[in-house]
Each structure stands twice: as structure tokens, then as C-alpha cells.
Image (cartoon, helix red, strand yellow):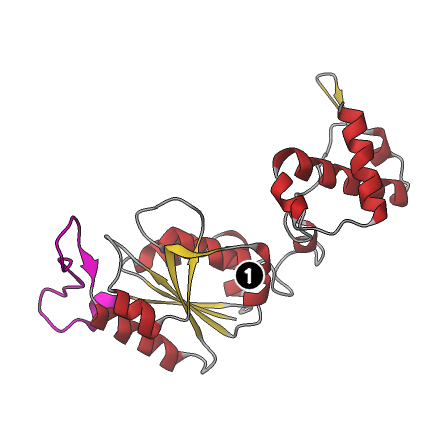
Amino acid sequence: MRFDVVTLFPEMITGAASYGVTGRAIEREIVSLSVWNPRDYTCDKHKTVDDRPYGGGPGMVMKYQPLHDAVKQAKLAGSAAAKVVYLSPQGKPITQRLLSEACQIPQLILVAGRYEGVDERFVNRDCDEEWSVGDYVISGGELAALVVIDAITRLLPGVLGHEESAQQDSHINGLLDYPHFTRPEQLEGCSVPDVLLSGHHADINSWRMKQALGRTWQRRPDLLKNMNLSAEQNDLLQQFKSEVE
């Protein structure tokens, strides 16, 4: 899969993406990453990429032409099936389902805005979608782009050390993840649950499902409203509720 990021701070993207899961995926050529600076596509000696907003108001707005030309070059360097996404507080919320679907896109062009935003004509003419990392505002889209790249990369085949790792994360099946434990078995009076030491895989799986259901009920009950729980899951959730009460 190919990622392209349109950004005024290319080093911010390439530097952070060189570490961890994403960095290893790039080294192994499972994904590729390119950055495009709108300043390289300006037509004046000052490399101007922003201007005052029409109608007045604070801040500056990123100009259409440098962004348009940067996206155009990114498309020429990649696939005809590229999707252009503007990372914006006004966009659709980024969910695990959206990210899983994005894994099928051969080229994803992520546009990181700055200042007060970008010229709306760029959003309407050049972008396929707007995505948001949450109901809050950050100083630019670079951090959001890195979140998207990391979250998609770890879903791609061959990226993680264990193929099932990504499939057991929170939100993959609509639920939050179950609790995890490792050595030592005893820690200041707190013990690892006996079932995890039993070696009985069916019991372990049942316990993990109950914990995932219970944790979701406690912390994100809104997620359960969108799920059709099986009879077994409903029974496990009722068991969890009885135990905590």
C-alpha cells in the first residue's frame, strides 16, 4: 500500500513514521510513504501557501493552487485508484471499520491542513472525503495523518509479528479489548486470574469474551447499542454484571 502526505512539515511525517510498526513495514516494502510540500508548488519567490480569509476574521487560509498541484503530483507518482482525504475536524469520525475498508485502497493521499484551514474549493474539487480523529482541534493534520498511517499499516498482512494480533485489538469486533496479564504471577497481593493459568482454552476464551463485554458495558456502553449480541454473549454479559454488583 502507498501513503502520500501533503504537508508543510515533511520531516514531521518521515521522522515519526520511521519508528516502530510503520518503520518496519516501510523497510520491508509492505508500504511506501512519500511526502509532498505545497511550498514546492508555489509561483512566487516567497513560496506563499496562505492568505487572508475573504470576509475577514482571524488567521490565514491555505491557498488552493499549491495544494492542488501537490495532490496532482502525488497522483501521478502513484495509482489511478488513489483516494484523497483531507484531515479535518469537520470530517467523518475515523473508526476501525473505516480503517479496515481503507486497507483495500492501493494509494491513500492524506492532506494535512494548517492555520485556519484550507480553501473550501480545494476540499470540494480535489478531495474525496474528510476524516476526523475526534471532536477536538489540533494545530495541524500531520499528527492525524500519522495516526491513520499507523492504524492502517498494522492491519496489513505480514506487518505484525503475530497474524492474530490486530484481530484481537479493541474495536475490531465492536468491543473493547479484554484485560491482559504477564509475569510475575503475584504482584503486591494482586494475582493473575486463575482461569488464565488453567490451560483450558475454552474457559480462557469464554473469560476473555466476558471481560471484553463487561469492559465495553462499563466504559463504552454506546458501542453495545450498535451490536446484536448472541445468546452466549448476552449470558456472559449478565454474568459479568452479577459479579461486579
Position in image of residue 88 (x %, y %): 37, 56
Residue 55 painted magenta: yes
Position in image of residue 15 (x %, y %): 38, 54
Position in image of residue 77 (x %, y %): 38, 79
In this orientation, which residue lies closer to the viewer: 120 or 133? 120
Q: Give the crowd class for mark 1: few <14, some 14-19, many >=20 residues within 10 Å.
A: few
Position in image of residue 223 (x %, y %): 63, 45
Left-right relation of 200 to 127:
right
Q: Tell me the quadrant of the picture where the C terminus can be found.
A: top right
Q: Principal SS element in the magenta part?
A: loop
| Vertical relation: 203 (above or below) 129 | above
Choose top left, top right, bottom left or bottom right for residue 217: top right
Please, which residue is most extreme toward the left here? Answer: 45
Left-right relation of 141 to 214:
left
Residue 196 painted magenta: no
Q: Which residue is mark 1?
A: 98
Choose top left, top right, bottom left or bottom right for residue 238: top right
| Vertical relation: 190 (above or below) 20 | above
Q: Which range is magenta?
A: 37-62
> At 75% from the left edge and 37% from the top edge, which residue is drawn?
211
